[in-house]
Amino acid sequence: MAEYRFILLDAAQVRSGRFPLPPTFAVKARTADTEGRFSLLEVTLVNDIPRHVHDRADECIYVLDGALGIEFDDRTYTATEGMFTLLPRGVPHALRRASTPPPRVLQISSPGGWELYLEDLFEAGPAVLTDGRLDPARINPIAAKYDIRYEERAESSGHGDT
């Protein structure tokens, strides 16, 4: 029986993990809860997510509130409340805030692992930031473990920076 995997969470409840995530990343189903099949998070996108590729996981996003800017391959879209997008593995994409307040979404990663990656990323703290923003060159060593690659621009390579 699968009763041992049954989960029922109140609206404000989250699944705890190895490292605490900020409240903008509310984990509802962990990878371990689904035997690796997927992870589910309720996310408030307070910071834009740089262009990247998932080599292993498909990403599904359902917009609960606000507007989400999506760069997919070489096109740009806006998803608003009630809209859904599937971001298949292997295709570059980025996510942007397209509303104030920022968009709130349900994010599913299949197979799972997204919350584990986020735990590693937040545990690294300021080491992954440059000028207060996520730095792809600093994120990539952590992301590689999860088959994720962020695009690095030549100007953000660190040459000439102190």
Image (cartoon, rainbow, N blue to C red):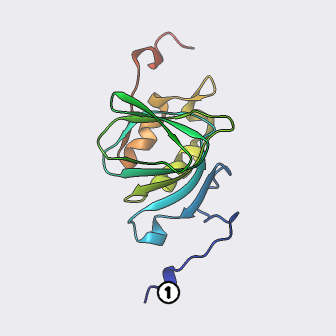
User: With respect to residue 23, does 16 lie above or below?
Assistant: below
Percent across and percent down for residue 28 are 57, 63
Q: Nearer the viewer, residue 65 or 36?
A: 65
Q: Give the residue number, with chain letter if any, for mark 1.
A: 3
**Residue occupying the point 50% across, 60% down:** 40
Report the quarter where the N terminus lies: bottom left
Q: Secondary structure at mark 1?
A: helix
Residue 100 relative to residue 40: left or right: right
| Residue extending furthest toward the bottom | 1
Examine the rendered structure and indicate whether residue 125 appears above or below residue 160: below
Task: State whether residue 91 is above or below residue 133.
Answer: below
Instruction: Single out the residue that lies furthest toward the top.
Output: 160
Q: Residue at x 50, y 9 (%)?
A: 160
Q: Is residue 18 visible?
A: no
Query: Where does residue 10 sit, x and y in percent of width and height?
Result: 68, 70
Q: Position of residue 103 (x, y in %)?
A: 61, 42
Indicate the amino acid at tag 1: Glu
Residue 148 appears left or right of 46: left
Task: Name the residue at 53% across, 51% down.
Answer: 82
Residue under the image location 45 percent in, 42 percent down: 142
Task: Characterize the local packing of mark 1: few (<14), some (14-19) or many (20 or more) Cα atoms within 10 angstroms.
Answer: few
